[in-house]
Image (cartoon, rainbow, N blue to C red):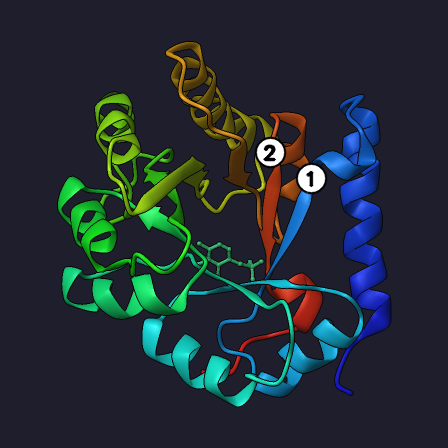
Amino acid sequence: MSLDEKAWQAVAARIAEAARRAERAPGSVRLLAVSKGQPAAAVRGAHAAGQRAFGENYVQEAVAKADELVDLPGLEWHLIGPLQSNKARTAAERFSWVQSVDRAKVAQRLSGARDAGHPPLNVCVQVNISAERGKSGAAPEETLALVRSVASLPGLKLRGLMGIAEETDDVDRQRRQFRILRELFDAARGQGLALDTLSMGMSADLESAIAEGATMVRVGTALFGPRRK
Ligand SMILES: *Cc1c(COP(=O)(O)O)cnc(C)c1O
């Protein structure tokens, strides 16, 4: 099976060390393995090692992969890439989580498309914490209103917030951006919304994210190596 055990152990050690430094429980950070650009065999190898939650950016790629892996029990697919409203139905049917909800229209489509026979779709509101032009995500100042409207939709279960920091080696800059998401998370909870997931941190910046309170890190290349294009 195509699993680089050393790479997986190294990521687990980075998460544990970052949690220790932040004086947080080692089990308080969940790992989402980002399998976009990786073959189904890579997911199969990770599943054999006990990983269940996988992140994908593209609906079609994820569906094709999931179809190849229907024999694997307990897989949990998370959509983390931008979602066009014309893909909302497929996304609502095929994913357990959509972390990239950044406007009310997509949330309404997902809710309407989620089959009543399924539990509500877990969602995160994506926030543009780096304020870079062209990046997806709701603006921080629009986030609480969007969070409240998502929380009221019957087909969705609002779990939390997701954000992507700017690509930079400047740790203070990373932390400042993650802190924006953390403060919005605290504000939403302060309004009585039952959010439990703060999804932030990737291969290059997971330490900063965990220091700022991430409960889920989304890691691709550090686990699986470079992606295929
Ligand atoms: C690709 C991607 C990741 C994983 O990035 P790596 O740098 O490979 O760890 C995490 N989150 C999102 C939203 C992504 O698009």
Mark 2 C-beta to ligand 1 under 8 Å:
no
Q: Which mark is residue 29?
A: 1
| Residue 86 found in image quarter | bottom left
Above or below 31: residue 89: below
Image point (22%, 46%), residue name: 107
Above or below 176: residue 198: below
Local crowd at mark 2 within 10 Å, few (<14), some, or many (≥20)? many
Above or below 180: residue 100: below
Above or below 131: residue 51: below
Task: Report the Cα–Cα distance between label 1 and label 2.
Answer: 7 Å
| Residue 207 found in image quarter | top right
Tell how many labels: 2
Q: Please indicate whether residue 66 sits to the left or right of residue 120 in the image.
A: right
Residue 173 percent coordinates (x, y): 51, 29
User: Which of the pair 2/49 is nearer the observer?
Assistant: 49
Q: Which residue is mark 2?
A: 214
Amino acid type assigned to the residue bearing label 1 in the image = Val
| Residue 146 found in image quarter | top left
